[in-house]
Image (tube, rainbow, N blue to C red):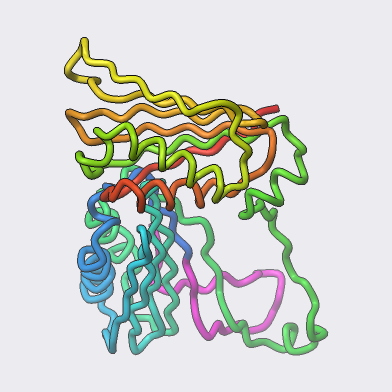
Amino acid sequence: MLDKNKKFIDDSRKENCFALGRQLTIEYYECSTKALLDKTLVEKALLDAAQKSGATVINSIFHKFEPQGISGVVVIAESHFTVHAWPEHDYAAVDIFTCGDNIDLEIAINSMKDSFESENVVISSDQNRGIISKAFEQKKVGQIVKKSEIYPISWKKEYESKNPWGVLTSVDIYDSDPNIISDAKSIKQFVYQLCDLIDMKRFGECQVVHFGDDEKVEGFSMTQLIETSLISGHFANPSNRIYLDVFSCKFYEPREVANFAMSFFKGDHYKIQIALRQ
């Protein structure tokens, strides 16, 4: 249970301690894709959480990125609620900062859980900000009090540090334009433009073959050998979905592949999985 603005004080210090604020970071996993794709729904989720928790809402501003992703902030009299949503991973990162004792943080967290339809919620940090005491006043400027483990957020840096054999990117694109995915020439054009974009040299011609025995998976399958491995995909006509794989022992930016494919085939949204193959 989360106590309202509970101050965590080291009992070994025989002095009063006062925090100017409290900050929580919350990870919402396994969310509803629909809930994270709609800017209006994401903004409403944070506004509802702020209001239900007792915060005083001042203003809000939210932005939808192309082709997908939403960031936003709700400014409250007590500080702020912020969010960034990754629909491709069914994940939202939320930050709550409060300098007041009137906000019920547990209500806020559970309200967003319901709005995002999240199956897994993790409070990744809970810390006092601006601790006022004689002990802290005596600390030198720039002193590191705590150092946590840092994970890479750049696939290029991760690739360089691990030196794998190759990178595999799998992209699922939903609600694509049926006229484009059912046209073999368009699919070949996509492959040629993608290879240019990620600087991959094609080896041989792009093969696009139609399969139609099972109407559930009926559509084109594509393969394109590249000098560093293979690009492949299946274009499912009944669902207007695309299942694209790019495997290469030469590095490329996975998100460039996803964003370009989403734009070319006029999809509604996408999911992405990335693996470094040793």
Judging depth in this view, the residue of 179 and 63 nearest the camera is: 179
Going by the image, does 96 lie left or right of 142? left
Q: How many marks?
A: 0
Residue found at x 46% / y 39%: 191
**Which of the 4 image quarters holds residue 119?**
top left
Assign the C terminus to one quadrant of the image. top right
Residue found at x 63% / y 87%: 132
Going by the image, does 60 lie left or right of 261? left
Residue 155 point in image, percent of width and height: 63, 49
Judging depth in this view, the residue of 227 and 267 nearest the camera is: 227
Residue found at x 41% / y 36%: 188
Judging depth in this view, the residue of 68 and 61 nearest the camera is: 68
Residue 59 point in image, percent of width and height: 28, 87
Going by the image, does 105 lie left or right of 272? left
Q: Is residue 100 above or below residue 45?
A: below
First to last magenta residue range = 1-24
**Which of the 4 image quarters holds residue 60?**
bottom left
Assign the N terminus to one quadrant of the image. bottom left
Q: What kind of secondary structure does the magenta stretch mostly adopt?
A: loop
Residue 156 point in image, percent of width and height: 67, 50
**Which of the 4 image quarters holds residue 218?**
top left
Q: Is residue 57 above or below residue 214?
A: below
Q: Is residue 3 magenta?
A: yes
Judging depth in this view, the residue of 224 and 29 nearest the camera is: 224
Residue 11 point in image, percent of width and height: 65, 69
